[in-house]
Image (cartoon, rainbow, N blue to C red):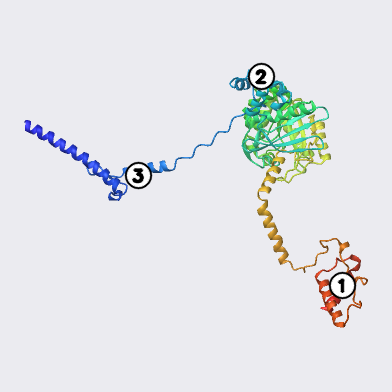
């Protein structure tokens, strides 16, 4: 029995020793002569080849030799003084060892239009330097600006991500200062007569980006003229009710920070029916404007493709009816008058019958008539003044509906929605492609000159002043009969050289000497 136990222990020791030596031999053989083993294999302790060791070593080697590039350094965050709140500003100051009461002083400067830290002279120099390094006076970057003779100012702004939006400031003789602002970069509604609708949709604007358009105008005219923005209309780029949450947050910011009441803020929509009903229940009593433009289903869908998306005219007019009954507020119907399209008396009657059919009270609606501002992507033009007056007369006399032709603002600049952005994009594209296009243009010109069948004519004007050109035809200046010429041979040689000079440098022609010039050319041909 003891002998059997000893034999078992001895066999186990021999087996263990064999396994250990086998591993060492395989490892030594691999490190000394890797080609001695099969590719991508190694020998298991029991002699079974497995395809695992070499791939792991190769992947480890690759990872070590080419580490991933480090992530880019984050851009330092700067607080936007135009859109910041008191709590945000106080947190920034206190965490950097500045007293929190300085936040009130900074906000007072901002409310007066002093947006640059060096203008805040009642702050310590150290704090002004800190603000210069850690804050910014707005996130919008001015791309271009146009000023109209009627005082309208239109701007295109670059957003931080490179998108373009537009804002317009319109002064009126009655003292109003109206800011027309954008709610989206681009627009997804696809209105065919609108330059923005022809561009397509890029992205939503944040509440801060919307508010900043109004705040920039308001603080600038306050600092320069002592005036303030009095009214705001969401009639710039984009569909406001398609960016509902950010638009309503911007409305509250405009009301609370700039002191512009909600009833002086107008939101325009092509007819996003669900959000019209949502707006009806809001506490903010903003005004609503419906971009109607046509009173028949097919015609409206042709001009405004979004008409079908939100249920057509029936769903829109039903929502309008409910809106007026619940809010008891008057709304506006926007009507862009396009010559020969929707500016006739019959179109006015269609509009009147539409409002009457859905029971829209006459004292709860107003029609705003806008002669079309032409765009490059749509062939229609603005309606004539007589057609505008006739349209107004039909609505007022036959249906008792008030209508007002809106004054066209900034007609001498790109004041229409999306027009300035289109111009900026076009200019930028032209600059990017200028070298190649100029090259092709020059090549085409050269090709046309070569293939032209018309004879090449000498230039009519010389590069020097004609007063300094020697007249070779003046008899007082030639010396053909000068006694210096001893023989006829010298005279002949002089005439030959003179003819060569004349043929190489013809004098500038004069209109009253055309026949004389032709005769001289014939004489030169005879000499040669």
Of badges 3 and 2, the one in the foreground is 2
Question: Does residue 447 show up?
Answer: yes
Residue at 24% of width from left, 44% of height from top? 25
- Mark drawn on residue 240: none
Query: Is 39 left, or right, of 421 in this rendering?
Result: left
Mark 2 neighbour class, 10 Å CA radius: few under 14, some 14 to 19, many 20 or more: some
Q: Mark 2 points at which residue?
A: 102
Residue at 81% of width from left, 27% of height from top? 175
Provide the secondary structure element on which disc 1 rests. Answer: helix
Q: Name the residue under label 1.
A: 518
Query: Is 478 left, or right, of 326 in this rendering?
Result: right
Residue 264 percent location from the top left of the image: 74, 25
| Quarter of the image that includes the N terminus | top left
Of badges 1 and 2, the one in the foreground is 2
Vertical order, 181 against 26 (above or below): above
Provide the secondary structure element on which disc 2 rests. Answer: helix
| Quarter of image, res 256 | top right
Residue 506 percent location from the top left of the image: 83, 69
């Amino acid at each position: 029995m003891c002998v059997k136990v000893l034999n078992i222990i001895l066999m186990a020791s021999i087996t263990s020793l064999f396994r250990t030596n086998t591993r060492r031999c395989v490892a030594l053989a691999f490190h000394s002569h890797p080609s001695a083993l099969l590719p991508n294999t190694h020998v298991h302790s029991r002699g079974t080849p497995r395809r695992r060791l070499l791939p792991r070593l190769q992947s480890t080697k690759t990872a070590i030799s080419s580490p991933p590039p480090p992530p880019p350094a984050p851009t330092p965050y700067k607080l936007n003084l135009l859109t910041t709140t008191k709590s945000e500003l106080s947190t920034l100051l206190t965490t950097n060892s500045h007293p929190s009461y300085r936040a009130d002083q900074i906000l007072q400067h901002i409310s007066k239009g002093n947006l640059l830290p060096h203008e805040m002279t009642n702050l310590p120099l150290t704090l002004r330097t800190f603000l210069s390094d850690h804050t910014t006076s707005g996130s919008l970057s001015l791309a271009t600006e146009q000023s109209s003779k009627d005082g309208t100012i239109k701007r295109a702004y670059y957003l931080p991500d490179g998108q373009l939006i537009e804002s317009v400031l319109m002064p009126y003789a009655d003292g109003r200062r109206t800011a027309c602002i954008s709610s989206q970069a681009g627009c997804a509604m696809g209105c065919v007569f609108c330059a923005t609708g022809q561009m397509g949709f890029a992205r939503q604007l944040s509440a801060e980006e919307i508010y900043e358009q109004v705040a920039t105008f308001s603080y600038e005219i306050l600092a320069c003229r002592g005036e303030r923005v009095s009214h705001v209309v969401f009639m710039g780029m984009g569909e406001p009710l398609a960016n509902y949450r950010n638009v309503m947050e911007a409305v509250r910011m405009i009301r609370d920070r700039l002191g512009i009441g909600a009833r002086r803020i107008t939101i325009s929509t092509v007819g996003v029916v669900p959000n019209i009903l949502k707006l009806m229940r809001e506490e903010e009593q903003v005004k609503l404007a419906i971009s109607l433009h046509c009173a028949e289903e097919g015609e409206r869908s042709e001009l405004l493709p979004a008409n079908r998306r939100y249920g057509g005219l029936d769903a829109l007019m039903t929502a309008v009816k409910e809106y007026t009954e619940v809010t008891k507020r008057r709304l506006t119907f926007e009507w862009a008058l396009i010559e020969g399209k929707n500016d006739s008396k019959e179109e006015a009657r269609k509009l009147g019958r539409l409002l009457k059919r859905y029971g829209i009270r006459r004292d709860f609606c107003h029609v705003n008539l806008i002669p079309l501002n032409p765009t490059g992507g749509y062939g229609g033009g603005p309606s004539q003044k007589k057609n505008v007056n006739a349209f107004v007369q039909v609505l007022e006399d036959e249906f008792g509906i008030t209508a007002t032709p809106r004054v066209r603002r900034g007609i001498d600049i790109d004041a229409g929605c999306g027009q300035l952005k289109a111009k900026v994009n076009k200019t930028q594209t032209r600059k990017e492609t200028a070298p190649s296009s100029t090259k092709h243009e020059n090549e085409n010109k050269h090709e046309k000159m070569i293939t032209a069948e018309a004879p090449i004519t000498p230039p009519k004007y010389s590069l020097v002043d004609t007063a300094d050109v020697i007249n070779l035809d003046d008899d007082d200046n030639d010396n053909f009969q000068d006694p210096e010429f001893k023989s006829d041979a010298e005279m002949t040689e002089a005439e030959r050289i003179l003819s060569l000079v004349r043929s190489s440098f013809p004098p500038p022609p004069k209109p009253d000497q055309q026949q004389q010039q032709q005769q001289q050319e014939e004489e030169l041909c005879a000499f040669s």
